[in-house]
Image: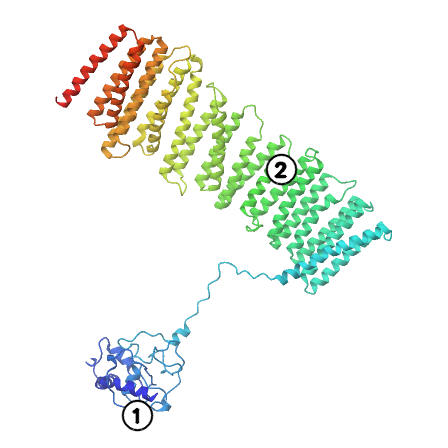
Amino acid sequence: MSEEINEILKRLSGMEEEMRAMRREMQSLKAGEGDDPPKSVPEGLDEEEIREAVPEQAVEPAAEEPSPATPADDDPTPEKPEEVPEAAAHPPSLSEMMASIGLSSAKGSEGEPVHAQKAEPERSEEPATGELGQPEPRETPEKPAGTYGWLRQPGEESRERPDREERMPVPPPPKPVFKEQKPFDFERQFAVWLPRVFMVILLLGVLWGLKVSFDMGWITEGVRVVLGYLASVLLGYLGYRSIRDARRGFGLTLWGGTIALGILTTFAANQLYGYLPLIPAFLIGIAYIAAGIYASIRTRSETLTVFTAIAGFLLPFLLEGEGASAVMFCSYVLILFLSLFVVSIRSRHRVTFYALFLLFNVTLYMYLLLDGVRGGHENLIAATALIQHLALLFFYLRGSIPRFLFTEVLLYVNFVFGLMWILLFDEPLLQTAYGVLAVLYAALAVYAYLLKDSALQDILSTMAVAASAVFILSFRMDEPAFKLMLIFVVGAAGIWAGLRSGAMRTLAVSGGLYAFGALSAFSFGWFHEIFSAEHAVWLMFIGTLMLVYATFYQHPPARVKTPQIDAALIAGQIVVLVYLFRLSGALLRDMDLAFGPESHLRIGILGLLAFGSTFLRRSPHGRYVAIAGMAEFYVLGILLLFLPMTGWQGGGYWLSLIVSLLFAAGVTDLLVKAIRGRKVSNNGPEVPAIAFLLQIFYFFLMNKWLFSGVREFGWEHETVLFIHTFLLFLFAFISISVGGKQDWKAVRIAGFVLLAICFLKLFIVDLASVSVVIRAILFTAVGAAGLVYSRTLQKEDGE
């Protein structure tokens, strides 16, 4: 260790003069002399820090103190720095300066008194080159050892004080998000289930032994009953002793055997031997069930509670005799359910709660099957189920049922079961029950709204809407249109309430109900008279739809934005188009129009609405409706091409022609606007493609007009060929001219193709089919027209 100290002191020899100057300055500061720091003080040290750096007591260094060698700043990372304790007599020496900058000799080192050194607690951080277990200088909160007061040597890395680290509070370990699962303990599970298996084996052995005794006549029927009850009491006592002796699993198994054996003995005494009438047997069975409930309460055993529930709901099916009635059955089942329900809630038994709900409904259903679906007790069964439904709802609203037990899904299931059980009521009690249920849920939803419980209000509003819909559908009406109108009203009201209060469940259920009404109106809402119930359904449909859209704009959901609502207006636009189509059919029904003209007129009305909606493009919410109107107008125009212009017996040609001309004008206007928009914004389809589509539309429309006129006016075959060929040539000339002028290559090529087809038709079909007179007129007219048009093309080319 001395060799290490000597090596360090040799490296510090160059700092001797600077350290002595600093020592003199610190003495003068302590005596109150001088205000300015000495020039030898390193930069960054002010007067206050230097005062803090002055040791309170110091002693003279030992006479054998070696002379310093080289400065420490030349090597910022000394190999093995050592620390010495503070002196205790007069101003600091070189060794004390070394200690003040964190460099000191070890305990017992050469030149230092051993008695001046004190043991220091171990630092939490050791120097990189230090030795384990080396003592360090004593530190105080006012002046950390190894520094100039609170300052550190320039270039020295920051070190944390160990006493401060010890005082820092240790943060608690983070709590696990999920409860740590214990490993599966096979031996423990084996010990739990083994007594139950042996209990079953014991019961089987006892039963077989009793069978042998019965067959041999050793045990009479009365003795059998007495032995059964004594065995059940014995099992109960042994179970009590086992639980008291800390064998809980074994004791609970024995108590389960007590209930099973007691119920079976009572069944045998009532059904097989006839010793017990129905009422005493039923009371004994109830006593066993009550004992099981009491034991489950005392032991807080969910398994025993479930077992007791199964035995209790099975008891009425094991006993029979005079005095049995549906009232007795329903009262027992209801009381049993409520008793076990209270036990499950107090003990917070989730499995028991679900098992009770299922067992109650299954028990009532089995009684209906055994008694006959129409055995005369349907109203009583339905009333029992309704009481259970209302009891669960009451306890849920009071907060007696924890939410983790009675979940939202189970609440909906209870509601659906209630609606199903009400179907057993006779009319008009059926409609009354549904109406009361709808009013009850609506009132509870309002109450939840007043309590500002949005989640509960959403759930109750959903059920109120569903109950109202079932109430409407439960009526038997000659006109189903009234049901549809009421469904539209209830659905729209539910959507309004859901949007206004932000109840998404209510909105979803009401929207589904409204969609059901809309599909029914589309499927069965045809009306042939203006003043009819079906027409009233459509008026109600459109009126409530306007209300729904207005509500969406006033109270939009959080995830729905205004452009999405604007796009949804297309659905309303389609509804209005369908309504106008059916209304036009009812209006034109008495006009005795042929199929062709009537179809053209009805489609013309729809086209007028679709074309008018294109002007809504600049309105705040009409952009999508305008685009949809344009697409609908094109679709109607294409549909119009395939409809006949006259009836089977003719007539109505001019009306169909007027509608077709209007459609042609509308299509032309829309396509011209599309071409202009393309030229301005460079958005949308290419201009030649639009012009080519318009060319095809005109070509088919021209042929339709021609051949429909031929059928209407009965033109001769030669006249038809003459006019058709002339029109084809004219259409080809116009296509070539317009395509060349506008530089629409597709239109021009189509014109040339049509011109070639016209030449083929002229020389193949017309030449062989018309007379010489018509041939002369046709060729002369076509040739003259062709020469004139050719001259026009030559002028355009400059030749």
Q: Name the residue under label 1.
A: 62
Between 640 and 627, the one lying in front of the other is 640
The kind of secondary structure element at disc 1 is: loop
Using a 10 Å C-alpha cutoff, classify the residue at mark 1 as few (fewer than 14 neighbours), some (14 to 19) or many (20 or more): few
Badge 2: few (under 14), some or many (20 or more) residues near its Cα, within 10 Å? many
Identify which amino acid the numbered label 2 is placed on: Trp
Mark 2, residue position = 421
Name the one closer to the observer, 58 or 675.
675
From this view, report whether residue 616 is shown above or below residue 656: below
Specify whether 695 is left or right of 476. Answer: left
Tell me: residue 489, above or below residue 600.
Answer: below
Residue 252: x percent and y percent?
69, 58
Q: Residue at x 40, y 85 (%)?
A: 119
Of residue 748 and residue 696, the one placed in the foreground of this image is 748
Which residue, as the protein is rendered here, is positioned at the far left? 799
User: On the rendered structure, is 109 left or right of 780?
Assistant: right
Quadrant of the rendered structure where residue 619 is?
Answer: top left
**Quarter of the image where the N terminus is located:** bottom left
Which numbered disc flags the more N-terminal residue, 2 or 1? Answer: 1
Percent x, y of residue 123: 39, 78
Residue most toward the right? 217
- Say what amino acid the circle numbered 1 marks: Ala
790 displayed left or right of 139: left
Residue 451 visible: no
Q: Nearer the viewer, mark 2 or mark 1?
A: 1
Q: Which residue lies furthest to the top in this view?
A: 773
The location of residue 32, given as percent across then percent down, is: 24, 84
**Residue at x-position 71% and y-position 39%:** 327
Give whichever of 24, 256 is nearer the camera: 256
Q: Given the current orientation, which residue lies at the most extreme bottom position?
A: 63
In space, the residues marked 2 and 1 are separated at their CA atoms by 106 Å
Q: In which quarter of the image is residue 598?
A: top left
